[in-house]
Amino acid sequence: MISWDKNEKVRSSVLGFIKSGRIPHAIMIEGESDDCKLQLALYIAAAAVCDSQGSPCGQCKNCHLASVGTHPDITRVSAIDGKKFLSVAQIRELRADAFVKAHSASHRVFIIEDAHRMNEQAQNALLKVLEEPPKNVIFILLVPSKTILLDTIISRCVLLSLLESVALDNTNSETADKFIDLLLSGSEYEMLKLLTPLEKSRADAEDFFKALSVCAAKRIKASGGHARVLDALFDDTKYYLDLLATNINMPLLISLAVSRSKGLLDK
Ligand SMILES: [Zn+2]
């Protein structure tokens, strides 16, 4: 995992608004790594609840509670166990909760993990509170790519992008886009032909699957009828990256990725 503070641009904007004591009330963090995004969100949350201004001091009671994950003013919201999507009821509950005063800190922070798992109705419910946020409340949305959310939500948030440049590299994105096109047209043989060169290099395969994850995420919003397939493909890229980290045989991984992806269309 690359730590968020290795990203100079993100680091300077985060330290900037924390030092000035003006943390934006709506922040969106995009990036491939869930751990990395969460780590950044928790750092901002700790800074927001800390007694001293400027950075999380690490000494006060609020910092202590934040570091062990039990701070009453830091709420993490994710899809309920077994459910794939954040329900509109959850967002309404969060909205009501946001109007309750902070328990022990000066601010309340809501971290919405997997914010891309909000359907349009849930996003619109959230939009209402982002438009007229209660005082001293901070919302942090974690997404693989900002493009998945409604433009109205994006425009309300300060964006912190942790996307690795490899995933944004044109060659990787083109291959990933092509793979998705072939998948949606059901061309298993062409998919295999496209990915076979990756068998030679684990590093290239890793770059490809990272790019695929971002491309799949980006296309979920645009693709109406294929949203389910793209969403499943997005989840699968994490699985392939996990397999790559093991000593898996490369031709096996490539043929697995092709047949499993093709299978998504048939489901
Ligand atoms: Zn502190």
Image (tube, rainbow, N blue to C red):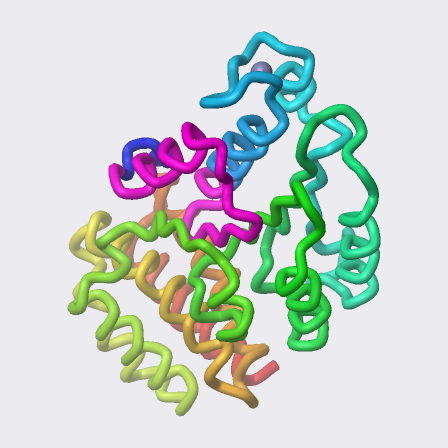
* Residue stretch in magenta: 8-37
From what the image shows, is residue 24 above or below residue 223? above
Front residue of 71/203: it is 71
> In front: 131, or 170?
131
Q: Quadrant of the C terminus?
A: bottom right
State which quadrant residue 45 falls in: top right
- Expressed as whole percent of the image width and height from the top left, the position of residue 243 reads 41, 47
Residue at the image position 58 percent from the left and 78 percent from the top: 228
**Position in image of residue 35 (x %, y %):** 49, 39
The one of 55 and 170 positioned closer to us in this rendering: 55
- Eyeballing the image, is 189 above or below 76? below
Asked if the stretch drawn in magenta spans residue 13, the answer is yes
What percent of the width, then of the height, locates residue 222? 46, 83
Seen as rendered, the residue at the extreme top is: 59
Instruction: Please identify the quadrant where the N terminus is shown.
Output: top left
- Which residue appears at 68% of the width and 46% of the height? 135
31 or 265, nearer to the observer: 31
Residue 167 in magenta? no
Which residue: 43% across, 46% down? 33
Q: Position of residue 197 (x, y in %)?
A: 17, 65
The quadrant of the rendered image in which ligand 1 is seen is: top right
User: Is residue 204 left or right of 66 when viewed as pictured?
Assistant: left
In percent of the image, x 50 and y 40: which residue is there?
23
Q: How many marks?
A: 0
Is 80 on the left or on the right of 74, as rendered? right
